[in-house]
Amino acid sequence: MAIQRLLRFEASRLRFLTRTVARYTSDCHSNINHEEDSSTSYDATKYYPACIGELIQDKYRLISKLGWGGNSSVWLAKDTSRWPWQSDRYYALKISNCGVRDREFAQEELLISRHISQLKSSHQGRAYVRVANAYFDIQGPYGEHTCLVFDPLREPLWRLGRQFGGIGVPPNVLKAFLRLLLEGLDFLHTECRIIHTDLKSENLLVGFENDTILDRYVHHQESHPPPYKIGAGRRRICQSRPDFGRLQGGMRCVKIADFSTAVFGDQSTPHTHDIQPRQFRAPEVLLQCAWSYSADIWNLGTALWELLGETDLFDCIDHRANAYGRGAHLAQIFRLLGPPPLRFLERVDPTIRSILFSDDGTTSYPS
């Protein structure tokens, strides 16, 4: 009951904090020159050649492109199977690339989504986790693409700073959302036994403040179609339209999204592979020793620091090579927090330990 009262309080505080946001306009407009073809790893044969107005699975009509990543693109779609007297319903379709590893990511996310959805739990954090509602495969010109169907959400948490006319997310707003994120993470760890492994700001998504936001957005997209360009292989590349406009009141929730690299925590074989965005990696990940649920906690903390000011807690740069360095990253952590406990270093491979540390546990790497 105490948690419920606290969550109701935080929700009311969010509504209060966002009442004055309407005077600001979001400046998160996509640039047609910064779509998927701008990536150095872009392969025109991998992305599904979706088009605005396309009907997929005889049900989902594509309204707009919401964004793209290295393994997929995301589209807003209208459900055309509903009866005329029913209200419109929209979904976000995450269409994987057709590469083998791309589809593996999609299948892994689907596996995690199914596990979470089938779990019988009354944990409050369940409301702050986003899972796929459905999935299907579609045939593209160069192979099959797995499509995951989600309820649409407004925007990544980092964009709220711009909604408020600043850079980082205001601390009082972020504090209110933090409790919800911790509820969601606790649900994943204690009930689902899942380690997310990729808690970056792009994967913390804010919900719509009311049901009219999507309707207005769709009307605008239909009356003002986005521009497109013709890229390699004569593929049409549509401009992303992730901006749903100004906030129109209190925000409802925030959700943890994207389980494409998530793993189950209770495995007989310890996890030791690299995870997380480089600048957010936990010390045990950097030291290549066994990691578990605590890696997510470190990851969330460093991501929150970035959200407050759009700067990283650690720049992780080895200035001798002017590039990311694992040793430089560790040195910066230890400079801030002090040397790790010796019992922690005992878990590290002796070869790595001898390179990075002296006998007393202090780093031998320049910071």
Image: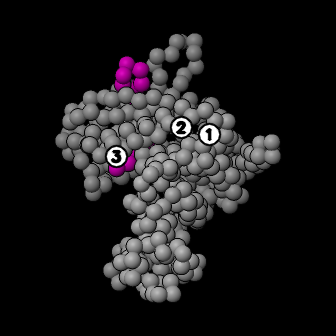
Q: How many marks?
A: 3
From where the camera sits, is residue 272 visible?
Answer: yes
Q: Which residue is mark 1?
A: 126
What's the amino acid at mark 2? Ile
Q: Which mark is residue 71?
A: 3
- Separation of disc 3 and disc 2 at Cα? 22 Å
Q: Which residue is mark 2?
A: 116
- Separation of disc 3 and disc 1 at Cα? 26 Å
Q: Are marks 1 and 2 in contact (CB under 8 Å)?
A: yes
What's the amino acid at mark 1? Arg
Q: Residue at x 34, y 50 (%)?
A: 70
- Other-residue count near label 2 (Cα within 10 Å), few / some / many at <14 / 14–19 / ≥20: many
Q: In the rendered view, would you say 152 is above or below 183? A: above
| Residue 23 in the image, given as x and y percentages of width and height | 67, 49
Sequence-wise, the earlier of marks 1 and 2 is: 2
Q: Residue at x 57, y 15 (%)?
A: 86
Looking at the rendered structure, the secondary structure element under dot 1 is helix
- The range drawn in magenta is 56-70
Sequence-wise, the earlier of marks 3 and 2 is: 3
| Residue 44 in the image, given as x and y percentages of width and height | 23, 44
Q: In the rendered view, would you say 104 is above or below 300? A: above
Q: Residue at x 27, y 33 (%)?
A: 144
Q: In the rendered view, would you say 277 is above or below 267? A: below
In this picture, residue 216 sits left or right of residue 176: left
Q: Residue at x 45, y 28 (%)?
A: 134
Quarter where residue 355 is shown = bottom left
Quarter where residue 365 is shown = bottom left
What's the amino acid at mark 3? Asn
- Tell me if residue 328 is in the magenta stretch: no
| Residue 306 in the image, given as x and y percentages of width and height | 55, 64
Looking at the rendered structure, the secondary structure element under dot 3 is loop
From where the camera sits, is residue 53 visible?
Answer: no
